[in-house]
Image (tube, rainbow, N blue to C red):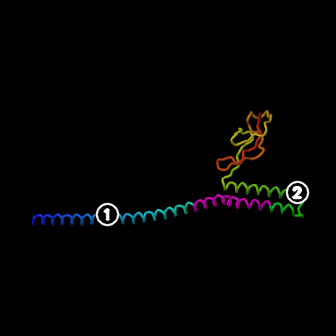
Amino acid sequence: MAEEKEQEKKVEVKSQEEQNEQQKESNDIQKELNELKNKLEECEDKYVRVHADFENTKKRLEREKYQAIEYALEKFAQDLLPALDSLDMALAAVSAENLKAEEAVEQLKEGIKLTIEQFIKAFGKHGIEVIEIEEGGEFNPHLHEALLQVEDAEKKAGEIVQIIQKGYKYKERVLRPAKVSVAK
């Protein structure tokens, strides 16, 4: 009987040790679970903040893009203002009563020439160029628009006879084709 009691005590001690060890493992698991929950909450918080920053940046960039589009022509308009001023000055000069008719016409021609040069210069700053063509040059349907076909004994069929209106291109795109007459 003493042996049985001793064995029961050993079993009880062993059982108590196993329970203590299980309790310790359970506490360790609970502690690790709490740490993981804290890390998860921290990561969720970081995610929410990063997502909010991303959305704010996205909205700001979108707003800046629309502002850039809205004000894209501002520099171009500023470059055209001197040409407009020149037209105003030419008109004022011609309106002066002390000029003779011939002088007024000459001053007006000179003012218009200078204004055209200012326009061409302003266009050039922004990549707008006159489409260069020559009378007698070959017709190019990508750069020219034929308004008339005329008989011309000196020109071959398809050659440009006359430039009716200048054409312009912006970088590599045609803004307006040159309007020409071509030989039949």
Q: Which residue is drawn at 79% across and 59% down?
A: 87
The secondary structure that dominates the magenta segment is helix
> Label 2 belongs to which residue?
102
Q: Which residue lies furthest to the left in this view?
A: 2
Q: Can you tell which quarter of the image residue 139 is in?
A: top right
Residue 174 lies in the magenta stretch: no
Label 1 or label 2, whichever comes before in sequence order: 1
Name above or below for residue 163 compared with residue 13. Answer: above
Residue 48 shown left or right of residue 137 in the figure: left
Q: Give the range drawn in magenta.
A: 59-87
Q: Is residue 2 left or right of residue 158?
A: left
Q: How far apart are marks 1 and 2 (CA)?
A: 105 Å
- The front one of 31 and 183 is 31
Above or below for 18 versus 151: below
Residue type at tag 1: Ile
Q: Which residue is drawn at 77% across and 60% down?
A: 84
Magenta stretch encompasses residue 62: yes
- The residue sitting at 48% across, 63% down in the picture is 48
Helix or strand or loop: what does disc 2 sit on? helix
Residue identifier under label 1: 29
Looking at the picture, tell me which residue is in the foreground, 68 or 176: 68
Q: Could you tell me residue 39's position as x and y percent?
A: 39, 64
Q: In this view, does 43 lie to the left or right of 16?
A: right
- Tell me residue 1's x, y (percent): 10, 65
- Residue neighbourhood size for the residue with mark 1, other residues' Cα within 10 Å, grouped as few (<14), some (14–19), many (≥20): few
